Image (cartoon, rainbow, N blue to C red):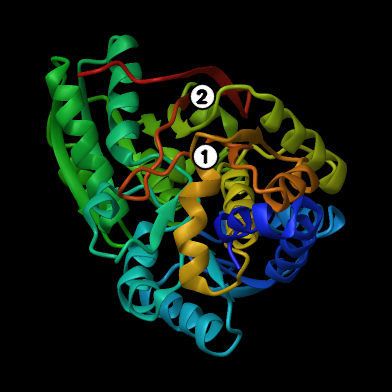
């Protein structure tokens, strides 16, 4: 029974009876399984652990507040077929009501096309940023709690131009994420008067990238915009430095990983800057940071643990709103709990959200990663962080919204 149906019972059965029915339905809706499709191995392994920690933190808080969710994990191995296989197992064997992930757009998209949209299970990625996802034919089963790279490309171009850099070469991982972000950056940078001297794609997990590096260095650019994941990125950076091809780098979200600095040395990466989706400071964000530190002992410099945390909350709240763990019903309720109008609830307020939904009151979830208002494509707007490696540490310079082009 949905909350909307419960409202119609109030004149007949009375407020007390309707509330009791709503509470019973809400409690039943929270007895649910959520699948987490995360790269615990492969090129994005460096982000897998922190993403899973974000998922586990949400699971712990929700259950402590009176919920009853179970998270089941599948390893995508940062590979499309492995991701599809993991998602299929979670859906067909574990009978999950929704999926959180994947991280790589090149894995998220085939999962959406082969599993989520076909079987009818909502999927929320907290890290897949490819612009391709916006127009994907996914039967409205694919959502994301992170803004598109159409925004990150403009943000990166803006800060690059503002630093007086007039020319740059690009190397990008040859998948939906890399190509989409490279194109978005180039279009925005050139619109601002900059020059992209070369744009070179590369395949993951190669022993040598010297050929691609030489092709990218064909021009007068001193800076290399590297759109990669940590494992391949480390190889590219090392070979670039060894070959004297590029010594100045601009990173995107996929390389905001302390492991790179540890492996290559701060003296080679100090001054490198980049962008990552990041929310402005809010009470919900502060709660998340405090809860994370209490649970794991330190803050994390890596992105996408907060967006994964939000995805778990949204699926759980949608089940409450729907009064059902049926995947289609959960999907249909996602925008009801994520978007205005409604009373705002956020991290640390799951018990309050349960009470409001049980009473038939609309809610609007404002997450750890900011407002999670899904548009017709399942996309969210967002702001971006400009960070710089200083003394071997990733330091936030500012959080901003890109200027309109």
Residue 192, picture quadrant: top left
Q: How many marks?
A: 2
Q: Position of residue 67 (x, y in %)?
A: 78, 61
What kind of element bears circle 2? Answer: strand
Where in the figure is residue 185, as x and y percent of width and height?
24, 32
The residue singled out by tag 2 in the image is 387
Res 206 visible:
no
Q: Callout 2: few (<14), some (14-19), or many (20+) C-alpha neighbours within 10 Å?
A: many
From the top left corner, tell me how far across and down residue 82 is, in percent: 44, 79
Residue 288 position in % (x across, y down): 73, 38
Q: Could you tell whether 136 is left or right of 345 in the image?
A: left
What is the CA distance from the residue labelled 1 to the residue labelled 2?
A: 9 Å
Q: Nearer the viewer, residue 133 or 4?
A: 4
Comparing 112 with 344, the one in front is: 344
- Locate residue 191 relative to residue 138 in the image: left or right: left
Q: Secondary structure at mark 1?
A: loop
At 15% from the left and 45% from the top, the residue drawn is 215
Residue that label 1 marks: 256
Q: State the residue at coordinates (56%, 73%).
A: 97
**305 versus 33 height, above or below:** above
Give 206 or 131, whichever is nearer the viewer: 131
Sequence-first tag of 1 and 2? 1
- Tell me if label 1 and label 2 are in contact, CB under 8 Å: yes
* Quadrant in which residue 348 is drawn: top right
| Residue 367 visible (yes or no) | yes
Assign the N terminus to one quadrant of the image. bottom right
Left or right: where 369 falls relative to 353 = left
């Amino acid at each position: 029974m949905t909350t909307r149906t419960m409202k119609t019972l109030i004149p007949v059965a009375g407020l007390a009876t309707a509330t009791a029915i709503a509470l019973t339905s809400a409690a039943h809706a929270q007895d649910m399984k959520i699948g987490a499709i995360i790269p615990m191995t492969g090129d994005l392994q460096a982000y897998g652990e922190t993403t899973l920690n974000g998922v586990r933190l949400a699971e712990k808080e929700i259950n402590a507040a009176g919920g009853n969710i179970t998270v089941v994990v599948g390893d995508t191995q940062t590979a499309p077929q492995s991701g599809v296989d993991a998602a299929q197992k979670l859906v067909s064997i574990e009978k999950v009501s929704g999926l959180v992930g994947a991280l790589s757009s090149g894995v998220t998209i085939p999962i959406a096309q082969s599993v989520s949209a076909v079987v009818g299970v909502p999927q929320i990625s907290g890290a897949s940023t490819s612009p391709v996802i916006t127009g994907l034919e996914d039967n409205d089963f694919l959502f994301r709690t992170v803004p598109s790279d159409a925004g990150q490309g403009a943000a990166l171009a803006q800060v690059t131009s503002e630093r007086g850099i007039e020319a740059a070469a690009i190397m990008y991982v040859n998948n939906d994420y890399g190509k989409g972000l490279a194109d978005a950056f180039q279009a925005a940078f050139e619109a601002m008067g900059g020059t992209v001297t070369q744009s070179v794609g590369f395949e993951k997990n190669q022993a040598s990238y010297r050929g691609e590096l030489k092709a990218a260095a064909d021009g007068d650019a001193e800076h290399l915009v590297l759109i990669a994941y940590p494992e391949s990125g480390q190889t590219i950076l090392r070979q670039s430095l060894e070959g004297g091809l590029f010594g100045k780098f601009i990173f995107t979200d996929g390389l905001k990983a302390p492991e790179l600095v540890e492996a290559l040395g701060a003296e080679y990466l100090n001054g490198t800057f980049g962008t990552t989706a990041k929310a402005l400071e809010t009470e919900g964000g502060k709660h998340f940071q405090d809860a994370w530190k209490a649970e794991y002992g330190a803050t994390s410099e890596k992105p996408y643990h907060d967006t994964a945390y939000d995805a778990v909350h949204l699926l759980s709240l949608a089940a409450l709103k729907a009064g059902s763990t049926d995947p289609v019903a959960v999907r249909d309720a996602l925008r009801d709990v994520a978007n205005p109008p409604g009373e705002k609830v956020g991290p640390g307020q799951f018990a309050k959200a349960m009470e409001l939904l049980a009473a038939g009151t609309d809610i609007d979830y404002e997450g750890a990663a900011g407002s999670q208002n899904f548009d017709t494509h399942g996309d969210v707007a967002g702001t971006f962080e400009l960070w710089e490696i200083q003394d071997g540490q990733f330091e936030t310079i500012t959080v901003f919204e890109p200027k309109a082009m």
